[in-house]
Image (cartoon, rainbow, N blue to C red):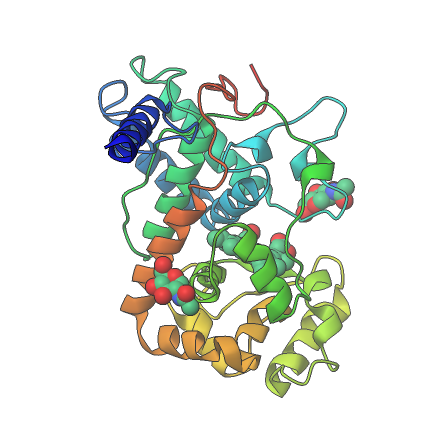
């Protein structure tokens, strides 16, 4: 009897303990987060991104890349947007990642459009506008629609030293190590890197491979020799043959040894990830489904709450 009583007490205590544990300090993202405060949010961002894309073909690729660089460094908190007066901020980190101005203006224009609706003014975080603009960049480039989880708060800090990003000469183990730190397994990583179906890269990121990387197609090598020979610092090439269309051509490109970045081509060269590349190359539906899952997961990285964040009034400066 005594031991039964102990067990009952223990169970009761456990139930009470569990019942009184406060909710985790992890943000609960929801797709309808702004439904009552800013019901027209998605349309406002959609129209604004459409206008930015009409002005520049770099807009969508640059905005999508910005979302990755934001989420990978101190979480999806729009810290990448912060401009510090002393110049010590993420976007001006020492190994200049050459983020394009068009990405920033796409987000700032969307924020201005959101704030021009009196209901929405200063109610929507820059981090959420960035997440929505990334989705629009994918969708309006011909990629999949996906519901965007919302409810992120903006961070207050941004420093050069906090920037730790994967490098173009990473091998598969280094890539896996970096992305597993963000919660991705290898297949999810291969799907996420399909973002390189959009946009371009400057010669310094791939020139070192020309003539020295045997996995590079000879035709591509001679083409790139021409591109970068005449203009090594400002020359650029597209990451896949359809740089303004979000499709699975990126993976077919890798099958032909025509990946521009070493970190992309290695996904095919290394037999451990080749199967995923082959799958996405032959099945765009599978790529779209897995990309949606992966970018949604990216959007959950290090999300801030009211306890450690704010709704920034100007995306470039903490309040
Ligand atoms: C292994 C990880 C990655 C590496 C090493 C990498 C590296 C690069 C480099 C070097 C460029 C060219 C930048 C330039 O010259 O302007 C680039 C462009 C781009 N990256 Fe990545 N990236 C990685 C992952 C990602 C991810 C996860 C995303 C998004 C989900 C992404 C989206 C983009 C986009 C859209 C562009 C084109 C930007 C433009 O045309 O302005 N990247 N990336
Ligand atoms: C970084 O790159 C941008 C454009 O790609 C360029 O305008 C800027 O001067 C560069 N900054 C540094 C510190 O090299
Ligand atoms: C990786 O994650 C995906 C999606 O969550 C899952 O379906 C797959 O089984 C995982 N792969 C491995 C090798 O764990």
Residue 242 relative to residue 75: left or right:
left
Q: In x, y percent, where is residue 78?
A: 52, 32
Q: Which residue occupies the foreground of this view, 286 or 38?
A: 286
Q: Quadrant of residue 319?
A: top right
Q: Is residue 54 left or right of residue 43?
A: right
Instruction: State which quarter of the image contains the N terminus.
Output: top left
Specify whether 190 is left or right of 29: right
Question: x, y percentage for residue 163?
Answer: 67, 42
Residue 282 drawn above or below residue 150: below
Residue 56 spot, x, y in % from top left: 48, 46
Residue 140 appears in view? no
In the rendered image, the vertical position of residue 231 relative to residue 214, given as above or below? above
Dividing the picture into quadrants, the one containing residue 85 is: top right
Residue shown at the point (54%, 56%) measured from the top left: 179
Seen as rendered, the residue at the extreme front is: 1
Ligand 3 quadrant?
Answer: bottom left
Q: Position of residue 161 (x, y in %)?
A: 73, 38
Say above or below: 229 vs 138.
below
Q: Can the viewer see residue 122?
A: yes
**Residue sitting at 34 percent across and 54 percent down?**
293
Q: Is residue 116 left or right of residue 64?
A: left
Name the residue at 58% across, 25% down: 316
């Amino acid at each position: 009897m005594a031991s039964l009583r102990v067990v009952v007490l223990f169970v009761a205590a456990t139930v009470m303990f569990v019942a009184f544990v406060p909710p985790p300090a992890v943000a609960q993202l929801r797709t309808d987060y702004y439904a009552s405060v800013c019901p027209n949010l998605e349309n406002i961002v959609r129209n604004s991104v459409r206008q930015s894309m009409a002005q520049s073909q770099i807009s969508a690729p640059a905005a999508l890349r910005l979302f990755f660089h934001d989420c990978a460094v101190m979480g999806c908190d729009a810290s990448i947007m912060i401009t510090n007066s002393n110049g010590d901020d993420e976007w001006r980190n020492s190994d200049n990642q050459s983020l394009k101005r068009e990405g920033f203006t796409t987000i700032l224009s969307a924020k201005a459009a959101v704030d021009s609706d009196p209901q929405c003014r200063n109610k929507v975080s820059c981090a959420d506008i960035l997440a929505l603009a990334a989705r629009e960049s994918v969708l309006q480039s011909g990629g999949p629609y996906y519901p965007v989880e919302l409810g992120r708060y903006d961070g207050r800090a941004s420093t050069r030293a906090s920037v730790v990003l994967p490098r173009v000469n990473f091998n598969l183990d280094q890539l896996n190590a970096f992305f597993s730190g963000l919660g991705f397994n290898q297949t999810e990583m291969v799907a996420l890197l399909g973002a390189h179906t959009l946009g371009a890269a400057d010669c310094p990121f791939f020139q070192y491979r020309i003539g020295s990387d045997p996995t590079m197609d000879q035709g591509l090598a001679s083409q790139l020799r021409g591109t970068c020979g005449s203009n090594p610092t400002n020359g650029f090439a597209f990451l896949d043959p359809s740089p303004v269309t979000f499709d699975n051509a990126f993976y077919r490109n890798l099958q032909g040894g025509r990946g521009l970045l070493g970190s992309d081509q290695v996904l095919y060269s290394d037999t451990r990830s080749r199967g995923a590349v082959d799958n996405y190359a032959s099945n765009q539906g599978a790529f779209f489904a897995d990309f949606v899952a992966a970018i949604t997961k990216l959007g959950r990285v290090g999300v801030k709450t009211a306890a450690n964040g704010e709704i920034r009034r100007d995306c470039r400066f903490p309040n």
